[in-house]
Image: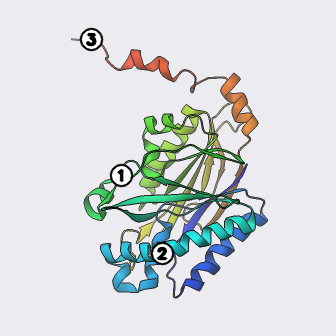
Amino acid sequence: MKIATSAYPISWLSSWDDYVQKLSSWVKDAREHGAEMLVFPEYAAMELASLEGEDAAIDRLGAMAAVNKHFPNFVKLHMQLAKHYGVHILSGSAPIKDQDIYVNRTGLFTPTGHVGWQDKQIMTRFEREDWKVASGGPLHVFETAIGRIGVLICYDSEFPLLGRALSDVDVLLVPSCTEAQSGYWRVRIGSMARALETQCVVAMASLLSDDARFYGVDEATGMGAIFCPPDKGFPESGVLAAGDMGKAGWTYGTADLNQIAEVRKDGVVLNRNHWSEQIPRSMVPSKVTLT
């Protein structure tokens, strides 16, 4: 599975055609480089708020309403591009209204016209306290023609039990939006830990922004990167590929599904298989007084 994961810059759009041209160009470029799985970052869909003007884009409720207004066309466009270029696309996520709450939702679009939705599980303080975005539906394992895929949206990657719930996937996708480099490194460290524990490949995408007109995504930095278990057949660093901090573009790498299976079967270590051994040892530690 050849993966293209993005450092994607949010743009101020003057028309829907601007967005169509931008997204089409990104997808076309990745396909021309042989990518089969394209990963866009968390909250990349917030750029749709610019279509309703500055007053809407800078306002919490106005921005979310604007994104939801254009979301049906956003879905259609992703379906068209996935089919036209014969690729799988993880879309940039968006705060989507689901009954009476907003959830952080991304879609996995296939060349055959199917789409699977994944909601963020655990919300950051900003999402809870300021944005009022809530936890959504459960985690999913997506069975696709190119492999088993799971999604942990940004902060979710920092929680090992969520990663463990997706231990059967070949590839984990981690779309992220982090204001500072410290946030980027938290998500990167979490992603690398999930690759180690689950003995799989993890592709992290990052949003880039420096535009005060966008509520919630006025600042963002990071890079595209692809991680792996540091085991036989993979790089000793656990890094398959990495971009440059703050530089827009695709980062490419290949997830060898046969190698993932081999490491899980006969790696130097077998973290995934040995997970259960930690539970009786660590849940109730004994107390030792050293005085």
What residue did someone put label 2 on?
Answer: 47
Instruction: Name above or below for residue 151 compared with residue 93.
Output: above
- The answer to whether 133 appears left or right of 221 in the picture is left
Expressed as whole percent of the image width and height from the top left, the position of residue 234 reads 71, 37
Q: Which residue is mark 3?
A: 288
What is the crowding at mark 3: few (fewer than 14 residues within 10 Å), some, or many (at least 20)?
A: few
In the displayed structure, 22 sits above or below 93; it is: below
Q: Residues within 10 Å of mark 2 (few under 14, many from 20)?
A: many
Residue positioned 49% across, 38% down in the render: 163
Q: Is residue 161 left or right of residue 92?
A: left
Q: Circle 1 sits on which residue?
A: 135
Circle 3 SS class: loop
x%, y% of residue 201? 63, 42
* x then y, percent, for residue 187: 47, 49
In the picture, which quadrant includes the C terminus?
Answer: top left
Question: At label 2, which amino acid type do we have?
Answer: Glu
Which residue sits at x=31%, y=17%?
284
Position of 221 with respect to 243 (left or right) is left
Along the line of sight, the residue nearer the viewer: 101 or 18: 101
- C-alpha span from label 3 to label 1: 39 Å
Q: Tag 2 or tag 3, which sits nearer the N-term?
A: 2
Q: Amino acid at mark 1?
A: Ser
